[in-house]
């Protein structure tokens, strides 16, 4: 993922709300969300080049998602795929705190990342550009291609809009997709300097990115209620036709 909004224990009906965009090169081969043939308990999209995923959830309620930390000066071409971090956690049976402790020891093997992982009840955050593991117990959080809660304009704008949505008794995934489809380009004075140049910083400042060869490939909205029912909604963008296809799944977390 490249943009994640996450509300945990912050709404009276839904324990967990996730709204996220995945930005990627258009040519990178990708499968839309589905239950995997080789691991039928995992639901998520799949990177067909490295076999990992950017966001996934399991039928027993484990969930994980990853963003890249934008630092082009320190990219190592031989580093393992960051999507493997999500897949490894979803396949693991370790409690999240044990998994995160072990990951700290090998985090530097990867290019820059931020990982959120846990269950629909509790989540933790780790980045190899930050020390330690942060427990996320309740609240609304935003994450893009930096550290958790770094106040980039699209993060702040999205959080403000989602905070208003969370005041409603009933939540509609379409309203969250509206937030994720925001193509507002922010003023130069508010943009970070991540080493990609001001022209690219402008393009990347939008929540939904369109540019030649690269942009937002898919958007995902997950609602998990307090009874253990999960609603998984995905929009997949076709850059050639500028249209979307939709995927929806519902299931109860195994007890």
Image (cartoon, rainbow, N blue to C red):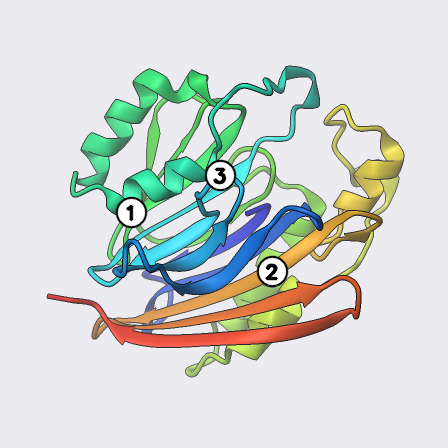
Q: How many marks?
A: 3
Residue at (56% x, 53% y) in the render: 30
Which quadrant holds the C terminus? bottom left
Residue at (71% x, 50% y) in the render: 26
* CA–CA distance in space, label 2 to label 1: 20 Å
* CA–CA distance in space, label 1 to label 3: 16 Å
Location of residue 206 in the rendering, given as x and y in whole percent from the top left corner: 75, 52
Location of residue 143 in the rendering, given as x and y in whole percent from the top left corner: 54, 44
Residue furthest left in the image? 255
Write down the residue under mark 3. Answer: 50
Residue at (47% x, 23% y) in the render: 110
Location of residue 125 in the rendering, given as x and y in whole percent from the top left corner: 38, 37
Q: Which circle marks residue 218 in the picture?
A: 2
Labels 1 and 3: the sequence-earlier one = 3
Write down the residue under mark 1. Answer: 90
- In the image, 43 versus 176, the foreground residue is 43
- In the image, 100 versus 235, the foreground residue is 235
Task: Residue 181: tell me if it is visible.
Answer: no
Would you say the residues marked 2 and 3 are in contact, meaning their CB atoms lie under 8 Å apart? Answer: no
Give the label, 2 or 3, closer to the camera.
Answer: 3
Q: Which circle marks residue 183 in the picture?
A: none
Residue furthest bottom in the image? 170
Label 1 residue SS: helix
Location of residue 232 in the rendering, given as x and y in whole percent from the top left corner: 41, 70
Labels 2 and 1: the sequence-earlier one = 1
Image check: 206 left or right of 68? right
Quadrant housing residue 68: top right
Looking at the picture, does residue 89 appear above or below residue 159? above
Labels 2 and 3: the sequence-earlier one = 3
- Characterize the local packing of mark 3: few (<14), some (14-19) or many (20 or more) Cα atoms within 10 angstroms: some
């Amino acid at each position: 993922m490249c943009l994640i909004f996450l509300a945990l224990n912050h709404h009276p009906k839904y324990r967990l709300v996730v709204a996220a965009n995945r930005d990627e090169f258009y040519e990178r081969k990708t499968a839309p969300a589905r239950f995997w043939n080789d691991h039928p308990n995992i639901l998520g999209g799949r990177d067909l080049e490295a076999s990992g995923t950017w966001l996934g959830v399991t039928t027993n309620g484990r969930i994980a998602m990853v963003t890249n930390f934008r630092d082009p000066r320190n990219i190592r071409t031989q580093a393992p795929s960051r999507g493997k971090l999500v897949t490894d956690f979803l396949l693991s049976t370790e409690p999240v705190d044990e998994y995160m402790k072990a990951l700290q020891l090998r985090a530097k093997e990867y290019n820059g990342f931020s990982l959120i992982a846990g269950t629909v009840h509790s989540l933790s955050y780790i980045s190899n550009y930050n020390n330690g593991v942060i427990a996320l117990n309740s609240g609304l959080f935003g994450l893009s291609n930096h550290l958790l809660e770094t106040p980039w304009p699209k993060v702040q704008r999205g959080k403000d809009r989602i905070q208003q949505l969370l005041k409603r008794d009933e939540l509609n995934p379409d309203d969250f997709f509206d937030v994720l489809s925001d193509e507002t380009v922010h003023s130069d004075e508010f943009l970070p300097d991540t080493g990609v140049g001001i022209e690219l910083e402008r393009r990347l400042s939008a929540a939904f990115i369109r540019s030649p060869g690269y942009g937002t490939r898919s958007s995902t909205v997950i609602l998990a209620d307090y009874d253990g029912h999960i609603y998984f909604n995905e929009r997949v963008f076709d850059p050639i036709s500028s249209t979307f296809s939709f995927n929806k799944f519902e299931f109860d977390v195994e007890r």
